[in-house]
Amino acid sequence: MPFQIGKKVLLEIKRKVDEERGAYESPEEVMGDLKKLQVSLETGEITIEEYDEREEELLEVLEELQSD
Amino acid sequence: MKFYLFGAVPASDKELDLEAVEILGEKREVSLLEEGDVGFLFSEAEVGSKLRASRKNVQTHAEALGELISSFGTLAPVPFGTLLESKEEVRELIGENYDQLKGTLTKISGQVEFGLKAYWDSDEIAKIVGEENEEVQKIKKKIEKGSVANSYEETLKVGELIEEGVEKRRGELKEDILEHLGPVVNDWKENELFDERMAANMAFLIDKSEEGQFDQAMEELGETQPEYLSFNYSGPWPPFNFVELELN
């Protein structure tokens, strides 16, 4: 059960990053997803590799939003 | 070259042999600059004007601080990514904030922080709470039988009752945590619960000499908790949550 939820969070974040970068309207929203990702990592629902990959993408989106 | 800051420590007459720590993917020497009763720890590093707050960078920063507090006993940390241009700026930083730094170091002297996060599966806890709540069970049965006028409203009511029940569980867990750990800690803080999977997110300030008792209390707390909860307990760290430096 917990694994399904963790993957759901990961997939939702991936969808937002891959398909709808515009889905993020503010840095706070990206920060919120970074925190959710951190929970998925700390509960063992995703691997460090999965975390780092998604974090890299989210940080890029965050930097783009912050430079606007 | 930038000066990457770790935090303030009490000045010492002793000769210190500081070991290199890993930050930003490399082992780096740590230097100490002292002015009066206050010292500042830093490393020289080739970095851009802004550091990326990635998990890896923030974690190595925290681990480096963990090693440094073991050497100094007291450390007032600065946030990750605090950079200065020169040693002179480090000296000025101490000078301009001397009273605040000295006061903070006195306040946190010999104390360290431990973090405690508790997690649960949000679906599982909602199910447990729902099964234990008589009103929820009554409404569910009515909905199943089709004997309610507005099943949408009744479903919303079930949602609200479950949410209240989950919040109540969070409150009970917090009380339980404080009952076990309270006698050993000097102070505690509740941090933001930023995800429904989080049941608790707390920080504790304890005397470094009480680490053994705190571990014991943590172990006892863990033994009393239901299986659906998992704990993430970390430390000793410098007191991040108990130091609010507003440096000029």
Image (spheres, rainbow, N blue to C red):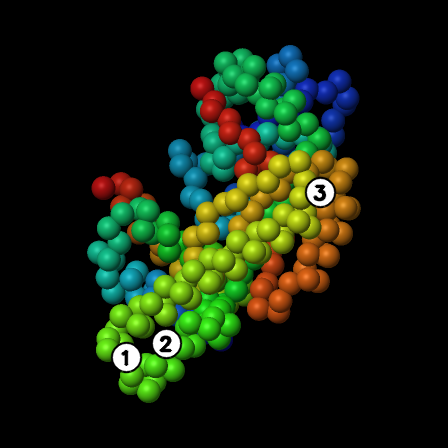
The residue wearing badge 1 is: B148
Q: Amino acid at mark 1?
A: Val
In the displayed structure image, the side of residue A12 where residue B217 appears, left or right? right
Q: On screen, B213 above or below B18? A: below
Q: Quadrant of residue A56?
A: bottom left
**CB under 8 Å between callouts 2 and 1?**
yes
Residue with the most extreme bottom position: B145
Mark closer to the chain start, 2 or 3: 2
Q: Residue at x 57, y 52 (%)?
A: B174
Select label 1 or label 3 by which is in front: 1
Q: Position of residue B13 (x, y in %)?
A: 75, 18
Q: Residue at x 31, y 51 (%)?
A: A29
Figure label count: 3
Q: Residue at x 28, y 79 (%)?
A: B148
User: Please, what secondary structure does the residue beneath circle 1 have?
Assistant: loop
Mark closer to the chain start, 1 or 3: 1
Q: Position of residue A8 (x, y in %)?
A: 39, 70
Q: Amino acid at mark 2?
A: Ile
The residue wearing badge 3 is: B183
Q: CA distance from mark 2 to mark 1?
A: 8 Å
User: Please, what secondary structure does the residue beneath circle 2 have?
Assistant: helix
**CB under 8 Å between callouts 1 and 3?**
no
Q: Position of residue B198 (x, y in %)?
A: 49, 58
- Regarding residue B96, the answer to whether it shows in the image is yes
Q: On screen, B181 above or below B88? A: below
Q: On screen, A6 above or below B73? A: below
Q: Amino acid at mark 3?
A: Pro
Q: Which mark is residue B139?
A: 2
User: Please, what secondary structure does the residue beneath circle 3 have?
Assistant: helix
B53 or B201: which is nearer to us? B201
- Regarding residue B27, the answer to whether it shows in the image is no
- Name the subunit of mark 1: B
